[in-house]
Amino acid sequence: MEVENFFSLVPCITPTYTPATYVFWNIHEPVEGRGFPYWLKGFTNITFRSYNEPFLIENEYNNVQEAYRESGHKYVKWAAELAVNLHSGIPWLMCKQRDAPDTVISTCNGRQCGDTFPVLLLVDRWMDINEKNLCCRYRVYGDPPSQRAAEDLSFAVARFFAKNGTLNNYYMLHGGTNFGRTSFVFSSQAVTTTKLHWMNWSEEDPKFGHLRDLHRALRLSKKALLKGTPRVQKINEDLEIITFEKDNICAAFLTNNDTKEAATIKFRGLDYYLPPKSISILPDCKTVVYNTQTMWPDIIRKSKEGGLNLIQTYVFWNIHEPVEGQFNFEGNYDLVKFIKLIGQEGLWVTLRIGPYIEAEWNLGGFPYWLKGVTNITFRSYNEPFLHHMKKYAEKIINLMKEHKLFADQGGPIIMAQIENEYNNVQEAYRESGHKYVKWAAELAVNLHSGIPWLMCKQRDAPDTVISTCNGRQCGDTFPGPNGPNKPSLWTENWTAQQV
């Protein structure tokens, strides 16, 4: 049996923390007798995953059980008996198994086990387990890379433990179908790597920090979760309070399940603000130590701790005006709140309003409805395009002025950028391109924000703005700004190599 070097199972299980791991039969016994390997297919009369003498243990068997009729039910019962009779001294699980025998524990696999698993919040149930919290979605050939936001994942985990959950496993976070490859890099190989994790799992990643802080909050609540009696108070269809309390021990989970509207919950005489689709954890039933939607303060604080003193941010037109004339600055799209948080940490802001931002973003940030405007030509001296760009730019700048976010108003915004790397495509527009550059600069200055305006990688940037460098070696490649009395600015230090 192959258990040496890379495939060594024992060091993997060393109890430094509590991950879950599969044991790969085809890896550990690639040849029969040496430790669903291919050689198993050669057995006479074998029927996989059935009460069949040659193949007689399991994972999500419920998905296929009906196809085996009575043999399937007998196989489930046999597999449970086999596990228990191995006398390992530990509990045995069967995931997603509705008719799991009483000698094993049935568990949940999925993305929202706090709401889909039927046995939660039964006090006499001693262990409720989310054995597979799917960190991203299945893909088929041609699908884009699958991602799952840290906010959604943390909401699901908090919800599960609020509903009396006992154990959560982040499924295939470090590999799974990517076993034997570089699991820390998201692969676009659909089919063979359909369930890879959704991020580089490192402590520097803000998503890692968001989940780390979630588990810290849960550990602060552990006495109440283990000893307290759960009680549920439904305020309305979307708002809910779950408490775990016994004697002087108490923990609370305040839930807002509305995906669009924030809410305020009154709990024990105090008001608690809940962003859309979020859960706040109160380990003492008084103090909010964590909210599943709140990532910005942690990211901004880490930026400052890393030595930064300024944060650049794009403004995404297609997010803020998804339908013509209907603007959205709520929840995660609250630009004002984001900039205020940066200012509260003592950092400055460069506001890159585009409206074309590129940023590996759909249509470079242009909203889809813009394509339907009659006779429009994007990023050109074209009347329909100029009309909508001007309206959008005025909306953003006036919003910043209204909340006094520009530097001459005492705010953190010290620079702004119009357009983005237009020089790359300018020649295709001929004279119209040059006129558009000049018009865009005049538009920016005439918005009267009281701060300098930038144009990145723009050789013919008008004198009213500052041309800047984007690239990897601006110290050697940048000839300087478009004027002797202007600062030399590196607006994009490309920290990775394009592939």
Image (tube, helix red, strand yellow):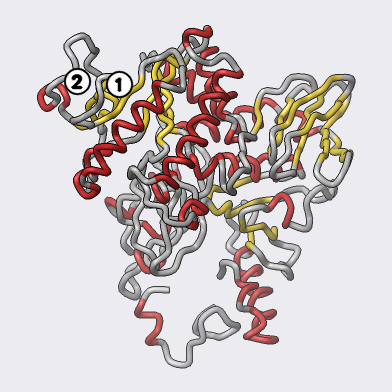
Residue 68 percent location from the top left of the image: 63, 85
The part of the image, by quadrant, that contains residue 107 is: bottom right
Measured along the vertical axis of the image, is residue 138 above or below residue 282? below
Q: Residue 477's image quarter?
A: top left
Tell whether 239 sits left or right of 421. Answer: right
The quadrant in which the N terminus is found is bottom left
- Separation of marks 1 and 2 at Cα, in angstroms: 8 Å
Q: Residue furthest bottom?
A: 45
Check residue 465 in the rendering and tell me which mark sits there, or answer none: 1
Residue 51, relative to residue 189: is it above or below?
below
- Dots 1, 2 in contact, CB < 8 A: yes
Could you tell me the amino acid type at mark 2? Asn
Q: Which mark is residue 482?
A: 2
The answer to whether 479 is drawn above or below residue 159 in the figure is above
On screen, residue 48 above or below 213: below
Element at label 1: loop
Residue drawn at point x = 54 percent, y = 32 percent: 210
Q: Is residue 467 visible?
A: yes
Depth order, front residue of 398/202: 398
Q: Earlier in the sequence, mark 1 or mark 2?
A: 1
From the top left corner, tell me how far across and down residue 293 is, in percent: 62, 34
Residue drawn at point x = 27 percent, y = 44 percent = 432
Q: What residue appears at the point 47 percent right and 34 percent down from the top-left corner?
A: 315
Front-lying residue, 47 or 288: 288
Question: Which amino acid, mark 1?
Answer: Val
Considering depth in this image, is 312 or 287 the residue closer to the camera?
312
